[in-house]
Amino acid sequence: MTDTDTTVRESTGSPKRTDISDVRRRRSLPWWAVPAVVLVVALALPFSTLYIPGLFEGALNSPSTLHLLALCLVFGGLATSYDLLYGRVGLLSFGHALYFACGAYVAALLMSVLDLPLLWAAVIAVTGGTLLALLLGAVSLRVNGIALAMVTLAFAEAGSILISRDPGRWTGGEEGLSLSAEAVPDAFVGVVNTVNLYWVAVGYLVVVLAVVWWLGASPVGRVWQGIRANEQRVAVLGINPYPYKLVAFTVGGGLASLGGVAYLLVNGGVTPGITTAEFTLTLLVMVALGGAGTRWGPLLGAALYTYAEHRLLQSGGAFEALPAWIGAPLSQPLFILGTLFVLMVFFFPGGLVALPGRIRAAVRDRRTERTRKADPA
Amino acid sequence: MSTVVLLIVTGLGLGALYFLIASGLSLIFGLMDVLNFAHGAFLAIGAYGTWWAAENLPGAGPAGVGFLLAMVFGVAAGTLAAVLVELCVIRPLYGRHREQILATVGLSLAVPALIQAIWGADPHTFPKPELVSGTLPLLGVNVPKDRYLLILAAIVVFVALWLFNSRTRYGLIVRAGVQDRAMVTALGIDVRKSFTLVFAIGGAAAALAGSLGGLYFGVVTPTQGMSLLIFAFIVVVIGGTTSLTGCAIASVTVGLIQQFANYYTVAGLGDIAVVAVLAAVLLTRQGGLTGKKSAERVA
């Protein structure tokens, strides 16, 4: 009973809001204006020597800043690929880390064990990750809702155990794998070439956004919207939801494994930390933080989350001046981020992207109230 | 033969641990449709509460009655945490299942980080009282005593929960609520009161699992809860999400499979075998081994 209540509220609430914003955007700017501006800014960043004190450690084109930005962009792409499942189709999967890790680990192993060049290793890793997502998706999509969440969680946990227990002495166990410098082109090796890693991250993000937006606007995307709003009704209309959900699962998994390869390059190696259930949970936090099912939300949430985690880790010593009972918890990024996330679920359910709309609505309400007061007729 | 007996008892002990966690999870899930990721946090609070009390609480100590007092303290801390989570986090979000899950996800990240901030990430040695250290022979095999304690505790909790479910008025309301929450509300019973009760029971069982898990593993770490929680989720799915008996059978099955596969094949394969069992159960009998109602109600 309560379930239908919420779905009705969602389905009547959100289209209205998007209608308004669509109309507004059409009147003022063409649809490609915002992505173009974002892309130009992203492409211009490495050529800027601007130094923003407090925000970054060095100038914008310094290796440390570029590395952090590249990580933000890779996680932005990964969160967008997760949002394809969670926000656009409404599938609650807790196993997204598996495909990301699959991409990263398979590529690293192919390069170190078989000495394959980067391109072939990437192609095989992404194909493998996509096939794995297709296979596991075909099994786990037989159930829905919470059961799906638990099954995907269990599959990912199996992968995580396999990697950290390291039965064949391949995955490096707890220490992980480092990128073998010989297999990678020289342009990706060394601190001087951090800017090239940044290009890789930008390229990955562009690919993910293009695929997700294009699919979201295609007929398949419309069926996804329907499944998200009410799966039973879609089935009653004569469309079998299963293949559509499987497409989303497979594409999401494929994009995640591509992200794994990008992460391997940017990070210079992989650790089992990216295989754990906690990692998928942080992806969920990123998506919900930015705004699920929106165009920019997952990217924004992931970039902010990654940035905050890094900066909080770096500034961990800053809290030592405080008394221990308050300073110690504040030096744990996960504590701050987890608490903030719980507060956000309470007070900003739509995520950061929905915030301007809420403020605008509040301002408009106040204005109409004021005019009504001033002009009672 | 002796190996088999040892593996069976150890597997039963592990299954008992899973049962303590999963029984609360399945109660909460069955009644409220909340997949409680914060359950691992209750477990960690129970474990750290016991460990802390054994060292610092006056009257409590690492042995004898003092340890019992420490365990009571740990379980009370876990119960209190569960009640607080239900009242402050879950209650304001009634009817919004997605948000409830997200909030517990946030807690599951924040609480272990808080524990890590206070007591560090390194494992702490858990006190082991005289009574449960050492071994006790069973069928000619020396079995560590803490296994018996785990199995005994799980049986006591199972019987207590079963009596609560079948003999008390609140148990009746909870059972009715699991079957049809809307109908119970329509009959004029405030089913929300039992939500807090169920959370308290689940929290207490998880905290007990935490402090007994400390005995079983010998150490406490901030992230212990999460890895146990995942297997508890698997147990809940295999057991059919709402049935206490199914939960018990599934816990024992999972514990035994894990122990035997880990011993007779490569270490780590047992954990993967459990996942394979889960996949097989889902593909053949949706809704678990005993469940009549599937876990699919919530989107």
Image (cartoon, rainbow, N blue to C red):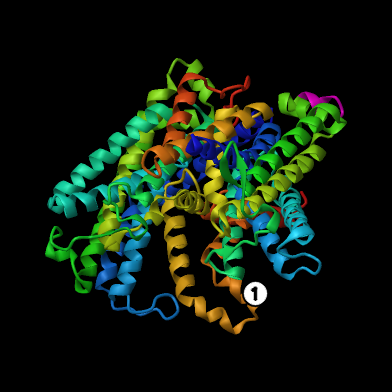
Whether residue A289 is in magenta: the answer is no
List x then y, in percent, for residue A313: 47, 71
**Residue occupying the far front of the picture:** B140
Q: Amino acid at mark 1?
A: Ile
Q: Is residue A88 above or below residue B210?
A: above
Give the quadrant of residue A26.
top left
Q: Which residues are magenta?
A: B183-189
Q: Nearer the viewer, residue A96 or A169?
A: A169
Q: Does residue A181 appear to the left or right of B257 in the view shown?
A: left
Q: Secondary structure at mark 1?
A: helix
List x then y, in percent, for residue A372: 73, 52
Give the quadrant of residue B124.
bottom right
Identify the residue at image location x=29%, y=78%. Answer: A49
Q: Which residue is mark 1?
A: A326
Image mark 1: chain? A
Q: Residues within 10 Å of mark 1 (few under 14, many from 20)?
A: few
Q: Nearer the viewer, residue A356 or B223?
A: B223
Q: Nearer the viewer, residue B126 or A215?
A: B126
Q: Nearer the viewer, residue B45 or B151?
A: B151
Q: Does residue A255 appear to the left or right of A330 in the view shown?
A: left
